[in-house]
Image (cartoon, rainbow, N blue to C red):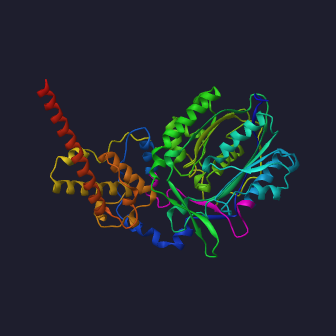
Amino acid sequence: MINCPVGILSLAVSFPSIIRTNDYWQHKFPHLFAKEKLRKTRVYPAIELTSDNSGIDIWSQEVAPYLSDSFRGNIERRVIGEDESSLTLEYRAAKDALNAAKISPDEVDLMIVASLFGEHTGPGNASYLARQLELHCPAWNLESTCSSALVALQNAQALIQTGMYRNVLVVVSQIGSNSVNEEDTLSWSMGDGAGAFVVDSLKPNQGILGSKIVHTTETCGAYIHELVTDEQGKPQIRTRTGENASTLAETAVDFVRKCCFDAVAAAGVTLKEIDFFAFNTPTAWYASVCTRALGIDPERTINLYPRYANIGPVLAIANLYHAAQAGKIRENDLVLVYTKGAAATAAATVMRWGDVALGPVPASPISVTQEDERVKTKISNSSAKIDNFSREKLLRNSPEERRQMLETYLLECMSSLLQVSVNNLNLEQSFALLLDSLTAILLKNRIEADLQVRVSLENFVGSSNLAHLVEVLLNQLALVNLISTQTVTDFKQEEEREKLSL
């Protein structure tokens, strides 16, 4: 059994009935868009924050086209209504996957469920879903944030190949809309949905060929999950951006390269041989980051973010489903799936696509166009940026000159980042009116790269401003200068002592 071909036999997705557009926030929370008043004078061309082709530089270049959009590429997201829940979505997806595979509930050998941000604050939905489906097999919960689907797939493959089970039903869901405060801009990117697939034996040479899964401990603290109570006093998990959020951008390229390179090596193929790539797309630019990182043609992937926003572990299933439904994946094609979960795992799986049966097609978007979902990459050879500014040049000047140089530098950085005229900015403006979590991370990364100091993300949020940031940076630089000067002095003294002893 160990060498038997195992893979996805059927695939289904399930989404709630409500399609929420950007108008919802614009009408309900107009104060969130106060900073748009600053965008009266557009800076053109926009200054490039970076120009290299590695790591954070790729991420920064791909996010740049979305910085002038308040919603950062969000257009629509599916949101549960009063009579919907993670369990209702999971049930529909599971039934559709079983029907497509022509397998009855009595024939299911095992079910693995990943319910991210479900209604229960304790264990997941496995037992509840098993009861609703009237299963007679084992059912358990598994969680690895956005990589849950691929981790469950690897588990299912191993259990089938060892002969423990004949088939496995995998069901994943995310209810992101209830996990965030609506007045937090993070809510703009959160959607709801569910997906399911049946894992079974396939034809010879089909199924999973190779995988690579690694932990993502570098991103611990990127999100904070807190227990709160709603208006009815019912407990629920509330998610917000954490202090370590910048690591999501800083590690994006390294993780996709590590997992994908190792997965194709394990499968005995090359990236050039892959017919289609399915990336999880938690942001509008993530597919572009992945294609740039791997050097592949954007036509060989798909980006459903404008349609569904961030639906966490469901993204991989939805991208595979829609690609297959649109004819972008055909039987015997080589497919690579990549996912990355914060404070969990990053995973890549290479499979030879079988005769995968699909569940019903979900409702079409109401305003998203094909152009919105086209994967674009921004490859820039421009060197136009805030040049000739470094820690060394800053420290050569007097304290008062340093302050003036630093103030000018920060205002120019903000002007470039927000695409507004420097004349519309001042040092006293609150970051709460200027930056969201994304632009705060970009500004933080730029400053740390140029000045070679570490700055807490707390200095870029809330009531803090550029004037406060100037003081923080001057103190940081003074400390760095003191340490480096002391080190040189100690070295010279040691050198003189050595000469005397000789």
On the rendered structure, is 498 left or right of 21? left
Residue under the image location 59 percent in, 56 percent down? 309
- Which of 366/416 is in front? 416
Residue under the image location 69 percent in, 39 percent down? 154
- Which of 186/246 is in front? 246
What span is colored magenta in the figure? 65-87
Decide if residue 296 is in sight here. no
- Which of 419/205 is in front? 205
Q: Quadrant of the N terminus?
A: top right
* Residue extending farthest front: 501
Across and down, in percent, residue 293 comes to 50, 38
Across and down, in percent, residue 75 comes to 56, 59
On the rendered structure, is 482 left or right of 227? left
* Residue extending farthest top: 502
Q: Where 57 sits versus 183, above or below?
A: above
Residue under the image location 81 percent in, 39 percent down? 165
Residue under the image location 29 percent in, 60 percent down? 422
Identify the main secondary structure in magenta.
loop
